[in-house]
Amino acid sequence: VSLVRASPRRRIGARPAPGLDLRSAMRALVEDAPAWVQNVAQLLSLLWCMWFHFARGALGALVSLAHPLTWLGERHEGVEFVVGRVHHARDHPVRRSFSYPLRLAVVDLDSPPAWFARSGQAADHMTADQARARAGADGPVKLLTSPWTFGYVQNPISVYYVYDACEKEETPVTEGGTGETLETLGSGKDGSRFRLRACAAEVTNTPWGERVVFDFDPRGQRVPKSLHVSPFMDALGDWHIKATDPMACFEDCGVDQNDAHESENKNKNKNKNAPRLAVHVDVVGHPAFGDYFRASFVGRPDARTIRRARNERAGLKTLWRHACTPHRVAFWIYAQAARVLLAGVPFFPPPGLGAIKEKSRERDVELEDERKRLDASRGGGDARRRRPPGFRGNDGATV
């Protein structure tokens, strides 16, 4: 697991949510108190964080109305947006599910929009060269993420898509016998062809602000659970994560990425049957609950004429639906946490990155041995089926 602690700039933009110090103080005061006292303290802290972000987001939306670009729109090369929904579902120890709308940016890290660096968000992520070095690739790099808004960001997960150049006449590889497609091929603006080689997930937990970065096969891979992502989940079990190809998604959508004057209705018609951009993360193999938690984002390319604009600069309709997305996400996270706490789910304090790192390294060795045995039982299989060339797994820590 590549463990990345917060940089100084990250502490400014993605500092622990207000109320974290209050939560720490309250926990210190009641750590020897009865369980019901501890739960009440946690609930009060969650309610404070929830309403703080609600008020902050509402104020930010009102401020946006005074900016001319909110009405006129903005256009930046090097970014596209997808509109979809996040869905969470858990089966144990209580059954709960929720979903909310989300509009995310797909940033071209080789030529990002001006706001990406100007806002400071670029320093919060890997560069294109760093992502290519991890995967041993030579093609473009895309990043699925939520843009900073009014100096704040809430990105539980960002995904890097790292590509390799391939010949124009190449076709996608399929599984022998079944015909299952094992990869997709995307096209650049100049007609060059690219193959999605590997992905990297950048996961940040709330409210502690810890972060891990790990590589995975976009076709689906089981990886060690390398971060304490929720105070209402223990550290047992693994993650199974998979993602679809954004470059192929935008290409198949058929929206002209270079024509700013194409009509909105025409774009919507093209987008109606477009393939979906999806990221799925499940908790699997828990010793008591089995495969008990599922999280996903599923969306389609924004087909509107100002689809390259951020949420606060893409017109009044988008402002109403998606303004101050980081603040909304924080509100939803804390609101659901309060509901889970009231449902009686126990609270699990974070064990620390050091303890999880050692556990995840050991687990990664076990998972790799299982993959090798499975490949041997299948007679070897397709090497690309097992993992992309140059794939880098949970193999060390960087700061």
Image (tube, grey):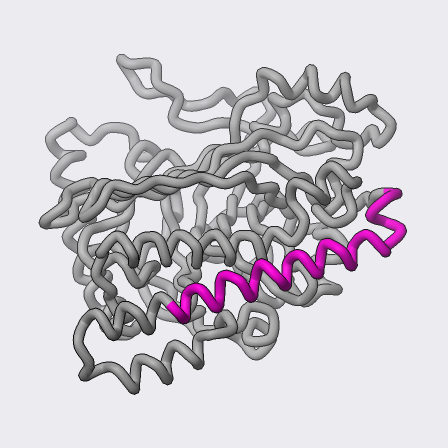
Q: Which of the 4 image quarters holds residue 227?
A: bottom left
Q: Position of residue 376 (x, y in %)?
A: 13, 34
Q: Residue 74's x, y, as percent?
A: 83, 45
Q: Quadrant of the C terminus?
A: bottom left
Q: Is residue 224 above or below residue 23?
A: above
Asked if 254 appears above or below 374 in the picture, the reply is: above
Q: Residue at x 42, y 39 (%)?
A: 87
- Residue at x-position 37% and y-position 42%: 88
Magenta span covers which residues? Answer: 44-72
Left or right relative to 147: residue 375: left
Residue 95 placement: quadrant? top left
- Does the magenta-highlighted stretch encompass residue 56? yes
Q: Is residue 292 visible?
A: yes
User: Quadrant of the rendered structure where residue 142 is?
Assistant: top right
Residue 16 image position (x, y, % from top left)? 48, 72
Taking depth in this image into account, of 341 and 256 the one nearest to the observer is 341
